Amino acid sequence: MIRASEVSVGDELPPLSLRITRADLVRYAGASGDFNPIHWNERFAREVGLPGVIAHGMLTMGMAARIVTEWAGDPGAVVQYGVRFGRPVPVPDDDKGALVEVTAKVTKVNDDGTAKVNVTATFEGKSVLGGASALVRLRA
Amino acid sequence: MPLDQSFVGRSYPPSPPYEVGREKIREFAEAVGETSPLHRDPEAARAAGYRDVIAPPTFAIIVSLKANDVLVEDPDLGLDYSRVVHGDQTFVHHRPIVAGDRLTAVLHVDGITSRMGNDMLAIRAELSTEDGEPVTTGRCTLVVRGEDA
């Protein structure tokens, strides 16, 4: 687990490139129990006005969390994590999938031994998670 | 039709207990690409001070998603789930979720607002063990798209 003495406001966390494929959507649907057909059925997704199958917002949120958990060294140190779901991430029916770029920066180090980390996630240069942040407990 | 404002402040009876299994944690960790041994190896988790393997930060969605059924099934609320979009989500972990936990969720309706023909439903799910130990607070906004939106 990362030590408080190693953390300063402005620190950038190692960035993350996520590749989300149709197989990831199927796996996440099964693991989470979210079987909404907009995440696996092209025909249904188009019928409700989407450009095609889109990733679960919760999948993007869950995958993006890794930038914080790997930096923290202990996923149990993430005491708070929140996001707004912005524009959807369409996932094409190919092997390459959709590429989401994740960055994160320390924006606050609190007296109670926690640090606030702001997270950004972009697809084709546009934000897909708004106001995303995590609160991480640091080792004394 | 707009949702009934009188639902603000309402809470629902606790959901049936959800038993957190080691293999479910591993499966979920793999689905979101979490690589930590603390999700997979009970020895590693114990060495880090946990009772058993711990769940990734967003695992609580499994329990809160199931708990949302009471909203969908409440005929008085009249929520059309096919028009519902997940607007935002936050988890506050009072402690990590650990394999072996038996979690129940109590749903609270914290707010109902209307914006540009859409209803915004602020929902809070309080996850605790059967013995009443608080584990996770999940907050989300469900956006109910209006007929014309």
Image: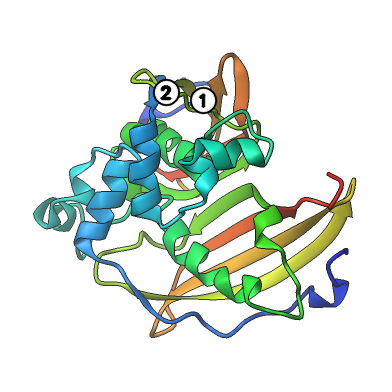
Sequence-wise first label, 2 or 1? 2
Q: Secondary structure at mark 1?
A: strand
Residue B14 got which mark? none
Q: Residue at x 33, y 44 (%)?
A: A27
Q: Secondary structure at mark 2?
A: loop
Q: Residue at x 76, y 80 (%)?
A: B76
Q: Quadrant of the N terminus of chain A?
A: top left
Q: Quadrant of the C terminus of chain A?
A: top left
The front one of A92 and A128 is: A92
Q: Position of residue A128 (x, y in %)?
A: 60, 29
Name the colouring of the figure. Answer: rainbow
Judged left or right of residue A79, residue A89 is right
The front one of B98 and A110 is: B98
Judged left or right of residue A37, residue A6 is left
Judged left or right of residue B39, residue B6 is right
CB under 8 Å between discs 2 and 1? yes
Q: Residue at x 39, y 62 (%)?
A: B95
Q: Residue at x 35, y 31 (%)?
A: A71
Q: Position of residue A138 (x, y in %)?
A: 38, 42
Q: In this orientation, does residue A3 appear?
A: no
Residue A105 got which mark? 1
Instruction: Tell me the residue that label 2 is attached to.
Output: A13
